[in-house]
Image (spheres, helix red, strand yellow):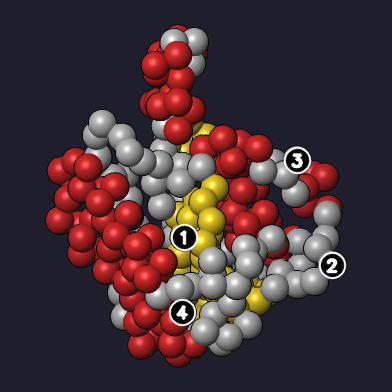
Amino acid sequence: MTSDEHEIRTPDARDVLVTGATGYIAQRLIPLLLSRGHRVRALTRAGSVARVPVGAEPVIGNALNAAEIASALTSNDTVVHLVGTPHPNPSKAAEFTRVDLASALAVTHACAQQRACHLVYVSVAHPAPMMHAYIAARSAGEQAMCDAQLTATFVRPWYVLGPGHRWPYTLVPFYAVASLVPRWRESAQRLGLVSLTQMVRAMVHAVESPPPQRTQRVIDVPGIRAATL
């Protein structure tokens, strides 16, 4: 991320509540939101307060509990939902239901109850030939948000490259070849790799440029790569 990105300020600050605020993406997202003048509150368990990025206001709560999320929300808030099973793989199917889907349903209920102005939800690129349980959980979260008629943005990466998440670089030659084959090209684009910097930039763009009220939009892998601030 360049220093120029940190120097830009948005003309109107937003009130942002981040769930999963001590995780992989949030650790980069929250400082950028703060640097652009937004007010950030971080929903976290009591034992994780020390890991909340400096400048964000910790809010003690359980992201699996709709009532606790709702108590931290107002109608002016943009909610960024980042709760999920770390390092997802096919062996964690039960956790995808217990954590990923349960938290998505909880935040949906809370946002609907408090009429939060915008929900930014990190989902996953699909369809895909693997990770079926993970995709099912995230897709069910998206559907619940659509059913609730929330103003929502679904950010759909496949894999986010960054510190400790670099092994897919070995797949880059495959992606290069697949993008040249017409019958593989669309899948290679939809399931492409994005960097942590690209992902964070796309999410800040989503926060600052919400869709029309009570509509949902998708930012897919090409959209994540193309997002600018």
- The quadrant of the image that shows the N terminus is top right
Give the mark, 3 or 4, whose residue is nearer the N terminus: 3
- Identify the secondary structure beneath mark 2: loop
Query: Pointer 2: what residue?
Result: 11
Label of residue 121 in the image = 1
Q: Amino acid at mark 1?
A: Tyr
Amino acid type, label 4: Cys
User: Would residue 185 appear left or right of 140 to someone viewing this image?
Assistant: right
How far apart in space, not on screen, are marks 2 and 3 (Cα)? 20 Å
Query: What secondary structure is found at the residue carrying circle 3?
Result: loop
* Label 3 sits on residue: 2
Give how far across and how far down residue 196 sits, in percent.
55, 41
Q: CA distance from mark 2 to mark 1?
A: 24 Å
x, y percent for residue 209: 69, 60
Marked residue nearer the N-terminal end (2 or 3)? 3
Question: Is 181 left or right of 41, judged from the image as shown?
Answer: left
Disc with the residue nearer the chain's start (4 vs 1)? 4
Q: Which residue is mark 4?
A: 111
Q: Name the kind of residue labelled 2 in the image.
A: Pro
Q: Nearer the viewer, mark 3 or mark 4?
A: 4
Taking the spot 27% from the left edge, 69% from the top edge, the residue there is: 102
Going from N to C along the chain, the mark reached first, 2 or 1, is 2
Query: x, y percentage for residue 77?
Result: 59, 78
| Classed neighbour count for the residue bearing mark 3: other residues with Cα under 10 Å, few (<14), some (14–19), many (≥20) | few
Q: Is residue 55 above or below residue 61?
A: above
Residue at image position (36%, 41%) is 126
Q: What is the CA distance from the residue labelled 4 to the residue labelled 1? A: 12 Å
| Residue drawn at the location 60% of the way across and 72% of the way down | 213
Q: Earlier in the sequence, mark 3 or mark 1?
A: 3
Task: Look at discs 2 and 4 and give the one toward the viewer.
Answer: 4
